[in-house]
Amino acid sequence: MSYGLGSANQNLPGFIVLISKDRIDQPLYARLWGNAFLPSIHQGVQFRGGSDPVLYLRDPEGLPAAGRRKMLDRLAELHAQQFDELGDPEISARVAQYEMAYRMQTSVPEVADLAKESTFELYGEEARKPGSFAANCLLARRLAERDVRFIQLYHPGWDQHGGLPKGIRRQAMDVDRASYALVTDLKQRGLLDDTLVVWGGEFGRTNYSQGRLTPDNYGRDHHPRCFTIWMTGGGVKRGMVYGSTDEFGYNVAENPVDVHDLQATILHLMGIDHERLSFKTQGRNFRLTDVHGHVVKGIVA
């Protein structure tokens, strides 16, 4: 989507990643928001919780802003010479990232400063803790207001092969109110109609117990056959359910949707034809949906 739509804010990245700080029981690797074979300008930029969301953004002690500007200008000239000789698009992407970092020195502290927010009653006291899921939801709304195209929130801690009863309660306390608050906040500000919210996990969990079963401790294994996500805003129907499983929740029984269909539908809601958006790499025009995918018209408003 970054490649297909471009950026609407020249002072912030087009793709920003927010990770809940206190949930570290699942590994998250930077390749999850990497650029793959697209130019690196399209990779996600992770914002950290706290007063310094992006590392190495501030100028070193003793380096004035004018000096940094002069350095970037000279660096751009050198890279321009390289590009003329080599024609590598990564050279242009590198220059663009240097310039973005320069502009982010003022834009990032402004957007990350929640001191004057009046919505903590809606999001809850957890939103006052930098890096919490609630604080990230509030920050996501602020980023959406500033036309950041794509914001992705990661909240680890769902891999409950054991300790499920306690773990799922903790996770629900983390995400339920904040997710509701984000949607409500977007709607109240008139942002929900053109903001698509997609809430999902990596896959489902089995409908039977894993490990030793006791009244207060058991687990559930991975289950890739069927699981649920929810979407709102951005052109999807609201207050409806699409698809169903069998009575055991084990197999899809009605209206299956695979990942290519989901991707095709999300692109469609953003105004992109998934069969026409492609990027040439290794001699072939690649689509996000490859040779698969159908728009799920039953959920489009």
Image: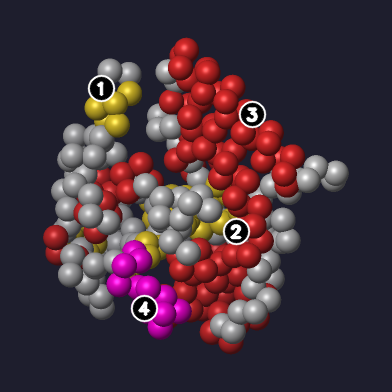
Q: Residue furthest right?
A: 62
Between discs 1 and 3, the one toward the N terminus: 3
Q: Position of residue 140 (x, y in %)?
A: 51, 65
Measured in 3D between alpha carbons, the distance from the residue under mark 2 to the one under mark 3, in whole angstroms, is 23 Å
Q: For mark 2, what is the residue?
A: 107
Q: Are marks 4 and 3 in contact (CB under 8 Å)?
A: no
Q: Nearer the viewer, mark 2 or mark 3?
A: 3
Q: Nearer the viewer, mark 4 or mark 3?
A: 3
- In the rendered image, the quadrant that contains the C terminus is bottom left
Q: For mark 3, what is the residue?
A: 74
Residue type, label 2: Ser
Residue type, label 3: Arg
Q: Which mark is residue 190?
A: 4
Q: Are marks 2 and 3 in contact (CB under 8 Å)?
A: no
Q: Is residue 1 magenta?
A: no
Measured in 3D between alpha carbons, the distance from the residue under mark 1 to the one under mark 3, in whole angstroms, is 36 Å
Q: Magenta segment, which residues? A: 185-196
